[in-house]
Amino acid sequence: MSDTTNPGEWKTPLRSAASTSGRRMAGARALWRANGMAEEQIGRPIIAIVNSFTQFVPGHTHLHEIGQTVKREIEKLGCFAAEFNTIAIDDGIAMGHDGMLYSLPSRDLIADSVEYMVNAHKADAMVCISNCDKVTPGMLMAAMRLNIPAIFVSGGPMEAGRMGDRPLDLIDIMIDSADPTVSDSDVAELERRGCPTCGSCSGMYTANSMNCLTEALGMGLQGNGTIPAVYSERIKLAKHAGMAVMEMLRKNICPRDIMTKEAVINALTVDMALGCSTNSMLHLPAIAHEIGFDFDIAYANEISAKTPNLCHLAPAGPTYMEDLNEAGGVYAVNELSTLGLLNENCMTVTGKTIGENIKGVQNRNPEVIRPLDNPYSRTGGLAVLKGNLAPDGSVVKRSAVAPEMLVHEGPARVFECEEDAIDAIKGGKIVAGDVVVIRYEGPKGGPGMREMLNPTSAIAGMGLGSTVALITDGRFSGASRGASIGHVSPEAAVGGPIALVEEGDIISINITECTLDVKVPDEELARRRAAWQPREPKITTGYLARYRELVTSGNRGAILEIPKN
C-alpha cells in the first residue's frame, strides 16, 4: 500500500499514519475497514468526534444528532470521522444525595478518557461536543494535554419556562418547593413548566458559563455558549465546527496556540463581565494547570477591580441565555476591548484573532448587556475572599448577593454535612442574621466537593435569602444566589480553619473588602488547632477513595496530583 499520510495539504505528518500506513499495519487497517472506513479514506486524516450524548441529562439528549452532523461535514472532505462518548452527570438530578459526590470528580475522568481514546487510536484532530457542567472543562483539559487541532461545539441552553407571565427555570422550582407557603399543586405545575426543552439549564449557571468561556478562550465558534439547543442555528454551528476543524488541521492550529495564559485571563475578564458561575474558579485553574500556568484565584479580584459587571442573567436577574443570545451573545461584550481589558491578539479556532472575531459585533439590547457607562456594578461578578477563616481563599458570586449582605456579621451555625444543615433550615432553626457553616464537604472531605444548591434554595424558600449567609468548603451551583461563599480553603478535612469554628462564633463577611474572618482570638484558634484530629474517610473503596488521595484544595481548582511524600 502506498503511503498517502501527508499528501501535501497537511502541514505536519498525520498521527493516524501509525495505524494506517505500511504492510505491518494490515491488521489495523482491516479493523478500520470493519469500522466503515472506505478505501478512499485510508491514509486520510482520522477525526475524533468526542461526544457526551446520554439520555440521563437533558443537556445531552440531543447531542448524537449534533455529532452525526459534524461527522457528515468532515466526511464530505474525504476524511474519516469516528465518534465516541464520555460520561456526563446531571448535577440537578445528582443533587441532594450522595450522587453529587461524583460530579466534580467526573471532570478528571472525562479528561482522562478523552486522552486515552484519542491517543490510543492516534486521531489527528477532534471535535468536542459538550454541554453540561464538568464535561466542557474536562474536555478542555484533555485538549490541552493532547494538543492536536480541536474545536468545541456545545449542545446549547434550554429555553426558559413560563407560568403565565412569569419566566421560570430550575432554581425557581427548587426555591418554591422549599417554601412552605407554596401549595403542592403549584409546585407540581412549576415542575412541569420550568424545564421545557432539551439543553443546559437556562440561566448563567455552570454549564452555560463554561460554554460561554469556551468562546472567550478561543476554542468555540461565535454562538457556542448562547444559541438555544432547539434552534436550527445550533445544527448550523455544528456544520461550521466540522469545516473549521479541517482548516485547523491544514494549518496545524492547536489548543496550546489558542489557550495561552493571555487567553485564560481573557476568559476570566469575560467571566467578570457576564457574571458567571463560581465553579469557573475551579475549572479555569484546572485548565491553566494543563499549560503550566499557576492560576492564583486571587487574580479574580485583580481582574474584577477593573472589569464592570454588564449582565445580570439568572440567578442574578430576570434574563436568560436566550436573551443574551438575542442581544448578540458573548462577542457583544466587546466593549471591554475599548478599556484595554481584552488581549485581542489571542488566536482562535477560526484562524483569526479574538480581536478580528469581535470586530463590528453589535450589542442589540443594552438592558441585557449593559453599556460600559451604565454597568450593574463597576466591579466584576465574582470575588475571592481571604482572612483567618480562608487563608488560601474562598469564592462568592458577588453579582448575585443582595446589597444588604455584602457586609455581614453573625453567629456561626455549624453543620458537619449538607443534610444536617437542610434539616435545620427547613425545621426553622436558622434565623435572620445567622451564618450557616457546612464543612467536611471539600474535595477531600466529601470526597468530591458537593454543590450546596439545596441549602441555598432552602434558605431562599424560607424567606431568609437576604438575611442569612452560608459558607462552606464545598461549592455552589451556578444557580445559587445570596451570600453563598464556597471553596473555603484549606478545607476542614486537612485541618483548615473552617474545621475549628464552633457554634456561636461570630463570622465577619465583607465582600466589598474581600475578607472572611472568624472573630476568635489567635490564641484560642491555636488551642483548637492543637486539639483537632483528622476524621476517618467517609469512603474507603472505589474511585472516590483514589480521588480523595490525589485531589488538591479548591483554591487550586481541585486538580489531581501525585502526593510528593
Image (cartoon, rainbow, N blue to C red):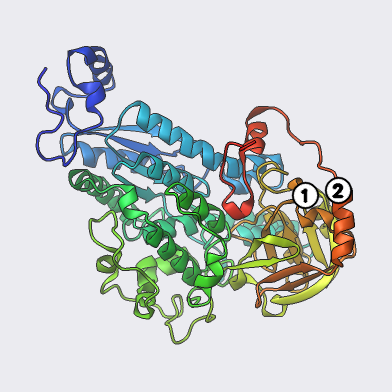
Which residue position is annotated with label 1?
Answer: 495
Seen as rendered, the residue at the extreme front is 565
Q: If you read the primary sequence from the N terminus, does the residue marked by circle 1 or circle 2 appear first?
A: 1
Residue displayed at 42% across by 82% down: 371
Residue 226 location, x and y as percent? 41, 61
Residue displayed at 31% across by 62% down: 346
Question: Label 2 neighbourhood size at 10 Å, few (<14), some (14-19), many (20+)?
Answer: few
Determine if residue 376 is in view: yes
Considering only vertical position in the picture, is 121 above or below 57?
Answer: above
Seen as rendered, the residue at the extreme bottom is 373
Which residue position is annotated with label 2?
Answer: 532
Q: Secondary structure at mark 1?
A: loop
Residue 209 location, x and y as percent? 49, 59
Considering only vertical position in the picture, is 40 above or below 426?
Answer: above
Amino acid type of the residue tagged 1 in the rendering: Gly
Residue displayed at 28% across by 68% down: 355
Residue 401 location, x and y as percent? 65, 72
Q: How many marks?
A: 2
Amino acid type of the residue tagged 2 in the rendering: Trp
Side of 123 where 440 appears, left or right: right
Quarter that holds the N terminus: top left
Q: Quadrant of residue 397?
A: bottom right
Q: Nearer the viewer, residue 96 or 277?
A: 277
Determine if residue 199 is in view: no
Quarter that holds the C terminus: top right
Q: Nearer the viewer, residue 226 or 396?
A: 396
Residue 47 location, x and y as percent? 27, 36
Question: Label 1 neighbourhood size at 10 Å, few (<14), some (14-19), many (20+)?
Answer: some
Is label 1 in contact with label 2 (beta carbons under 8 Å)?
yes
Q: Secondary structure at mark 2?
A: loop
Q: Nearer the viewer, residue 3 or 32?
A: 3
